[in-house]
Amino acid sequence: MSKGKFYITTPIYYPSDKLHIGHTYCTVATDTIARYKRMCGYDVMFLTGTDEHGQKIEEKAKEAQVTPQQFVDNIVEGPKGVKDLWKLMNISNDRFIRTTDDYHVESIQRIFKKMYDNGDIYKGAYKGMYCTPCESFWTESQLVDGKCPDCGRPVRYAEEEAYFFKLSKYAKPVQDLLETGTFLEPASRVNEMINNFIKPGLEDLCVSRTSFKWGIPVDFDPGHVVYVWVDALFNYATGMGYLNDRYDDYDHYWPADVHMVGKEIVRFHSIIWPAMLMSVGEPMPKKVFGHGWLLLDGGKMSKSKGNVVDPYLLAERYGTDALRYFLMREFPLGSDGNFSNEALISRINTDLANDFGNLLSRTVSMVEKYFDGKLIADRESDPLDDDLVGMASSLRDRYENEMDHFGTQAAATEVFKVLSRANKYVDETAPWVLARDPEKKPRLATVLYNLLEALRICVVLLQPYMPDTCVKAFEQIGAPEAVRTWESASEFGALPADVAVVKGDTLFPRIDMEKELEELENLNNPAPAAEPVLPDVTIDDFAKCDMRVVKVLSCEAVKKSKKLLKFSLDDGSGTPRQILSGIAAFYKPEDLVGKTLVAILNLPNRKMMGQDSCGMLLSAVKEENGEEKLHLLMLDDAIPAGYRLC
Ligand code: MSP
């Protein structure tokens, strides 16, 4: 019998770059809660997906010289893409929505029209400061030092004809909702929303764009595309079939029980989202949980800062379950946490290899050694057992209490307290001493039974964290299906008294910290691969390549491109030569003026971002922290412009 429905979501991810460990953290947290609820007997619906529209994607696709659809398809469905990563991380989502899916597009058009028809969307002109990477308009008062308050990047003045959503109309009901105290968690985020956004006055929200095309068209006003956040937020409803025929369980699952979101997008979920739902007359989600960020060296991970950690590398090296466990055990969900390789390896060694893995393997080995693998335990109790038995019997309650309040870290900690207690119990009872005395065999059987039983209860409760490992552990313990359940976790003694263990592989091998850290360092900064030398060319062929010394007369960033710098170069001919080079991420234009570089002049001219590039600057590529860095070839300034390299 189901305990009722439980609908949980993750944010839908921007497929503008490959996902990193920060995104993985959010999805693993949601998955852990979804698995927990399923284990408890809820009818769980877990939705995740990708948010594929917007100017940023359009620009990235242009730079990559593919269509926006090809661009997102590759990151979502392609090798090591979003779907592959969730498979690798053993994410148990029931559905995956892409905002480019036809049914979603149709629903959004209907939703937009519905809000327009009921008078909540009107046409106006937008004038304001816009952050392109975040696709957000900001008021002057919201800017921090004149920059985007979310990402800290520069904003630009933008003005365009646009549709507006009457967000201001919903300020009061949204504030009331926030003040219910259960809608938004952790509670600290409620004041932040009210004081920073509602109290200063909610302005109407610009909900359409005309300056780019990659979005869902407003069907009654071609030229406008729907603002990406309107398109994205409604995924939670369209993914269940709201205003479309693709799914028909909206009535069953809506309202969502939990939207898990990162703290920087709490504003969208706890203010804009409820207001839009009020506008279309749908019930409010029950909860928005704003989790903290995984930081690296104290800063938020982001590709543009070059400080991302590759979840593929970590999962492939240490195993999916170890990584999942680390993410959930190391950091409390509501706060920020600092990621480090040392912390990860140390968790694996201390908790997983030692406290858990070693206890399991020692216990199973002793059952094999002293009882040929099969126990007959009469379970006569001894005061020495009370503490362990008591702690293990009441573990489920403590765990449930934490899990029901997003205490994924605290719940795992409770489990490991019992495992530590069990380790201590091994020392206290000294089974190897009992084994020497044949009369103590019944007592020895009880001790080993208690250990197996404490382990079993812990393994039941660790399933949401480490699903695959728990199956292996159950097999070694010899726990039948019936005692792998939530119900059985509060019942010390549910394991059959004649349990038969099955010795298996070590669950988590210990890692040599020092050696491993060194290897990781090398993996992140590999020595240049000894690439094979290309086949010979003749000296005549080489001479066809017109490589010259050039001096940088001026250099500037190409508008709307994050990659390109535009150079005006003295090539010795007396006429400046224009070359575009994709090195904006590695150099400041002003630092290059006056430098002596090398260019190939006789390559066919190319157009990039609408501008001519007549030749190519020579550079070397170096891998640093998994990313390519370009280093321009620079020469002694004494060499005059126009000299040929030979
Ligand atoms: N597309 C929007 C969400 C729309 S939901 C209707 C978006 N996408 S995102 O890909 O940029 O981020 C997805 C989630 O990953 C966010 O909740 C964000 O907070 C989370 N994280 C991204 N980097 C993170 C860390 N370093 N640490 C923890 N979570 C982080 O926002």
Image: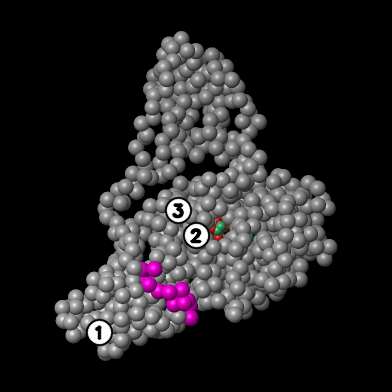
Respond yes or no on whether mark 1 lies under 8 Å from ligand 1.
no
Question: Splitting the image into 4 quarters, where does residue 116 fall?
Answer: bottom right
At x 75%, y 59%, the residue is 107
Residue that badge 2 annotates: 90
Q: Say what amino acid the circle numbered 3 marks.
A: Pro
Q: Is residue 621 above or below residue 292?
A: above
> For the C terminus, which image quadrant?
top left
For label 1, the crowd category at 10 Å Cα-Cα, with few meaning under 14, some 14 to 19 and many 20 or more, is: some
Tell me where the magenta segment starts and ends, as one range.
475-487
Do the CB atoms of the residues marked 2 and 3 lie less than 8 Å apart?
A: no
Residue that badge 3 annotates: 311
**Which percent across, then down, holds residue 516?**
30, 51
Gap between marks 2 and 1, in whole Å?
42 Å
At x 40%, y 70%, the residue is 474
Do the CB atoms of the residues marked 2 and 1 lie less than 8 Å apart?
A: no
Residue that badge 1 annotates: 442
